[in-house]
Image: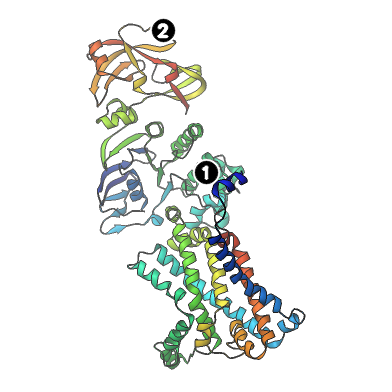
């Protein structure tokens, strides 16, 4: 039941030519800048836009293969969470979630019962009768997710599902969304321009640039070995899973990091490579994270040099060309990596 | 605040105020005159006299039927103009609005020559089905619908074009056919536009005169609607004409009141 899509869409001044495969239960993030063709790819998979070439196959079924086959959106087993959710304003939260079941032929009572179960799962049982405009951004997002999942689709498509939320809400909704995606047995394709969303939520990244796939792999692979400077800038994040006890986070990959804001329980810990400084000796001064690392690789990008460092934990550092010269960096060199606690952010997972 | 603004903006220019007041009087004085001249003491008995009552009943029935015809045909037409991938949509849209600016008498003449007993379509209706539309109550409904439909179409089409088509896409991804999406998603979201269009359409049908008298003639109890009765009564019984006019005026004011939020109150 693998989803295999060879997406070819040609329009005035823009060509999308991207191959995407999604295994059942897998979450694939389609990552790229605005105008890279992410939304076009999503619309093609949803059946809102016919392909001009290639195909979309799920298991033994063909959804799109021009010029013979085209299954429109309403006949594909899909669920879509749109960027601004597109909840139907005149229907209550419950009726929104029940809409897909009703449209696919479930009886009224059974559809409402199933919808109520889904609202309960996303923690909104108390808001079943609320109209969308009375819901907060985070609540609306959860209703949209419940609406998309209620029909038990084979393919779940998420279009920038967190983009419309403010920073504080985003943290919680991202963590919740992660739980729901892990429970969902179908194929998930997440479209986003936010590398953090992609790396936290996805099992595999597909990076799209100018309508083409420039790199794909697990978040760690892509972050550790970016193939273009665009990808390096985009996914250049040090991201670890760990468990927080106050300001100390013990990482699953080994090592401990100090954070400025206390947290507890499982977290994602993130800091950009630009926050990492390299020193030949143990650095002194303000309270910091400092640990011994070995240079594993050096890559030059547009304005900076990215250094891949092995250690506990392994880390990426962006340093200026001048520093590279100062330290006379060579693969195999032993150094100290340092990161300020205030630069390290922990997100609940 | 207000006084400061008044000072900074200067006095209202007489060149504008004077014609404005004259214009206002020009619009309002005839209506006030109508109310002053109305025989208020005999109004109830006039209103329930057989000829007035008959015309009123016929008017209400015909205008309502014409509105139903307009809704059944006009809403899908508006949808086609707003959403359909039909070639020459701009031309179609322009053609639909022709009855808006066409003198109603011309509309009546056109209907007569198409649907009349020897008309383009009418001859077959007569020969095959034995149906003759001119000078019947059905003819009144047709004439009114012809004149009133553009009001509905334009109002609904405007609402449709303002509505976000992505909601229909969302409905499609949930498994809804285009018809279901239209019924359950689009129609509820444009309901205010449909209601406004319906009220305007009904009011226009109620006041229809030119096309009706040309196509359906003037047969009391069958095709004599209120506006026709007003015109007739003016020659024989001016009091009845005033009563009928006051009734039509009240209906119009009622329509305005119903639509005040959408159409009357400007940006404030």
A326 lies above or below A61 = above
The numbered dot on residue A285 is 2
Task: Tell me the SS state at disc 2.
Answer: loop
Category of crowding for the residue at label 1, using alpha-carbon neighbours closer than 10 angstroms: few (below 14), some (14–19), many (at least 20): many
Q: Which of A178 and B131 is in front in this view?
A: B131
Asked if residue A297 shows in the view, the reply is: yes
Left or right, B258 with reference to A104: right
Mark 1 falls within which chain? A
Category of crowding for the residue at label 2, using alpha-carbon neighbours closer than 10 angstroms: few (below 14), some (14–19), many (at least 20): few
Mark 2 falls within which chain? A
Task: Please give the residue where the numbered disc 1 appears in the rendered image.
Answer: A140
Q: Quadrant of residue B223?
A: bottom right
Q: In which quarter of the image is residue B202?
A: bottom right
Residue A348 drawn at (x, y percent): 48, 27
Residue A105 drawn at (x, y percent): 49, 58
State the separation of the CA atoms marked 1 and 2.
Answer: 47 Å
Q: Which residue is drawn at 26% across and 17% down?
A: A296
Q: How many marks?
A: 2
- Whether labels 1 and 2 belong to a single chain: the reply is yes
Residue A98 drawn at (x, y percent): 53, 52
Q: Residue at x 51, y 52 (%)?
A: A88
The numbered dot on residue B267 is none
Q: Nearer the viewer, residue B249 or A36?
A: B249
Q: Residue at x 63, y 69 (%)?
A: B253
Q: Quadrant of the N terminus of chain A?
A: top left
Left or right, A157 with reference to A142: left
Asked if residue B176 shows in the view, the reply is: no
Task: Say whether disc 1 or disc 2 marks the residue closer to the N-terminus.
Answer: 1
């Amino acid at each position: 039941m693998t989803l295999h899509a060879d997406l070819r869409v040609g329009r005035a001044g823009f060509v999308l030519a991207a191959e995407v495969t999604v295994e059942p239960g897998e979450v694939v993030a389609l990552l790229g800048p605005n105008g890279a063709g992410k939304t076009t790819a999503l619309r093609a998979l949803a059946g809102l836009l016919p392909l001009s070439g290639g195909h979309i196959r799920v298991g033994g079924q063909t959804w799109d293969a021009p010029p013979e086959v085209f299954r429109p959106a309403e006949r594909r087993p899909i669920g879509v969470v749109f960027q601004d959710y597109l909840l139907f304003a005149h229907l209550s939260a419950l009726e929104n979630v029940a809409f897909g079941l009703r449209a696919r032929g479930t009886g009224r009572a059974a559809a409402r019962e199933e919808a109520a179960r889904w609202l309960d799962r996303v923690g909104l049982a108390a808001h079943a009768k609320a109209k969308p405009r009375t819901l907060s951004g985070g609540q609306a997002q959860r209703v949209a997710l419940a609406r998309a999942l209620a029909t038990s689709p084979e393919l779940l498509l998420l279009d920038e599902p967190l983009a419309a939320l403010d920073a504080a809400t985003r943290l919680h909704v991202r963590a919740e969304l992660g739980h729901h995606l892990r429970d969902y047995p179908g194929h998930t394709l997440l479209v986003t321009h936010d590398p953090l969303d992609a790396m936290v939520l996805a099992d595999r990244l597909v990076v799209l640039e100018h309508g083409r796939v420039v790199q794909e792999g697990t978040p760690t692979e892509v972050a550790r070995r970016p193939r273009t400077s665009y990808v390096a800038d985009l996914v250049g994040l040090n991201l670890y899973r760990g468990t927080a006890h106050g300001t100390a986070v013990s990482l699953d990959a080994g090592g401990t990091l100090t954070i400025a804001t206390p947290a507890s329980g499982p977290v994602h810990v993130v800091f950009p490579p630009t926050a990492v400084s390299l020193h030949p000796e143990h650095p002194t001064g303000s309270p910091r994270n400092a640990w011994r690392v070995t240079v594993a690789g050096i890559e030059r990008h547009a304005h900076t040099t990215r250094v891949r460092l092995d250690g506990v934990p392994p880390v990426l550092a962006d340093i200026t060309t001048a520093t590279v010269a100062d330290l006379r960096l060579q693969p195999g060199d032993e150094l100290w990596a340092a990161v300020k606690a205030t630069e390290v952010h922990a997100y609940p997972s | 605040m207000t006084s400061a603004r008044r000072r900074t903006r200067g006095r209202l220019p007489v060149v504008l105020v004077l014609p404005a007041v004259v214009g206002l009087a020009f619009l309002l004085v005839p209506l006030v005159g109508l109310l002053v001249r109305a025989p208020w003491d005999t109004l109830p008995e006039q209103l329930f006299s057989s000829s007035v009552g008959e015309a009123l009943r016929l008017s209400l029935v015909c205008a309502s039927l014409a509105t139903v015809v307009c809704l059944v045909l006009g809403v899908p037409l508006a949808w086609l103009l707003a959403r359909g991938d039909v070639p020459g949509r701009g031309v179609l849209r322009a053609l639909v609005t022709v009855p808006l600016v066409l003198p109603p008498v011309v509309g009546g003449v056109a209907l007569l020559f198409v649907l009349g007993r020897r008309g383009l379509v009418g001859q077959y209706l007569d020969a095959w089905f034995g149906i003759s539309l001119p000078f019947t109550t059905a003819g009144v409904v047709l004439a009114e619908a012809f004149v009133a439909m553009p009001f509905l179409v334009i109002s609904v089409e405007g609402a449709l074009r303002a509505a976000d088509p992505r909601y229909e896409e969302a409905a499609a991804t949930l498994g809804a056919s285009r018809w279901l999406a239209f019924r359950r998603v689009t129609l509820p979201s444009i309901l205010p536009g449909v209601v406004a269009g319906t009220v305007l359409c009904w009011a226009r049908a109620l006041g229809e005169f030119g096309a009706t008298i040309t196509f359906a003639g003037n047969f009391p109890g069958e095709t004599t609607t209120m506006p026709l009765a007003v015109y007739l009564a003016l020659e024989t019984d001016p009091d009845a004409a005033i009563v009928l006019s006051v009734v039509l005026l009240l209906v119009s004011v009622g329509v305005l009141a119903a639509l005040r939020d959408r159409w009357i109150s400007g940006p404030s």
